[in-house]
Image (tube, rainbow, N blue to C red):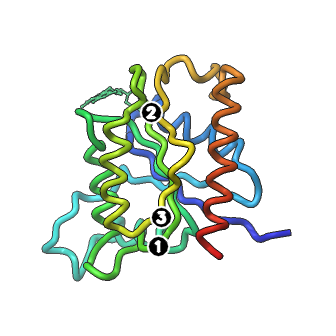
Amino acid sequence: MSSPVDVAVVVGSLRKESFSRKLAKALAAIAPPPLKLEIVEIGALPLFNQDDEANPPPPSVAFKSRIQKADAVLFVTPEYNRSVPGVLKNAIDVASRPYGKSAWDGKPAAVVSVSPGAIGAFGANHHLRQSLVFLNMPTLQQPEAYIGQAATLFDAGGKFANEQTREFATKFMTAFAAWIERCRN
Ligand code: FNR
């Protein structure tokens, strides 16, 4: 049996009832072995300040080492003003510095964007991908995951409310598992 693959899940919303967080949890529940998904919190990270690069605040150090330890990263994010929420961009910046010592470097990644609207946070998804190119994170291309109508997706217990979404989510996680495997070999 292969050893567990540690997937750090970074959620781009701090909202208690966040659809993105619900989706991250639902994806964790259906992830195929050997993937093991864990949400890595970003809400307590101080705003990145380049003056502190040589001596970052403790929450930033802890976050960066958690990302360093991960085998892969799954981003699940809403869209704010057609882009990535500031909290997520801040987390990305925090773990990317100092230059040449990024924790993201080379880690296989996937992006799921989520919105109550119709276009599934496409703008955030692709703005995020722009950063991932620079961060040298090989990112799953297909299937793309622009999840719209988020308010209809979950039942009261946080499980997928319809079979179609559950099937897509399973297909996505299976493709991500294969992608991670490919990137690691
Ligand atoms: C939004 N929302 C939003 N939705 C969208 O599809 N495209 C957008 O550009 C924006 N812009 C935006 C800006 C700001 C500042 C807020 C607070 C919200 C709506 C957003 O999708 C909605 O609030 C989601 O519920 C946020 O995701 P979580 O918190 O449910 O994961």
Q: Residues within 10 Å of mark 2 (few under 14, many from 20)?
A: many
Which of the two labelled residues, at mark 3 and mark 2, occupies the earlier sequence position? 2
Marker disc for residue 138: 3
The residue lying toward the viewer, choosing from 3 and 109, is 109
Residue lying farthest left? 51
Which of the two labelled residues, at mark 1 and mark 2, occupies the earlier sequence position? 1
Q: Is residue 172 above or below residue 72?
A: above
Tell me what residue is drawn at x 29 percent, y 53 percent. Answer: 89
Residue type at the position of mark 3: Pro
Marker disc for residue 82: none
Marker disc for residue 106: 1
Distance, label 3 to label 2, CA atoms, is 21 Å
State the residue position of label 2: 114
Residue type at the position of mark 2: Val
Tell me what residue is drawn at x 50 percent, y 69 percent. Answer: 107
Residue type at the position of mark 1: Gly
Distance, label 3 to label 1, CA atoms, is 7 Å
Residue 167 image position (x, y, % from top left): 70, 32
Q: Do the numbered discs 3 and 1 sit on residues whose CB atoms are within 8 Å? A: yes
Residue 99 image position (x, y, % from top left): 26, 79
Q: Is mark 3 within 8 Å of ligand 1?
A: no
Tell me what residue is drawn at x 60 percent, y 40 percent. Answer: 25
Which of the two labelled residues, at mark 3 and mark 1, occupies the earlier sequence position? 1
Tell me what residue is drawn at x 38 percent, y 40 percent. Answer: 14
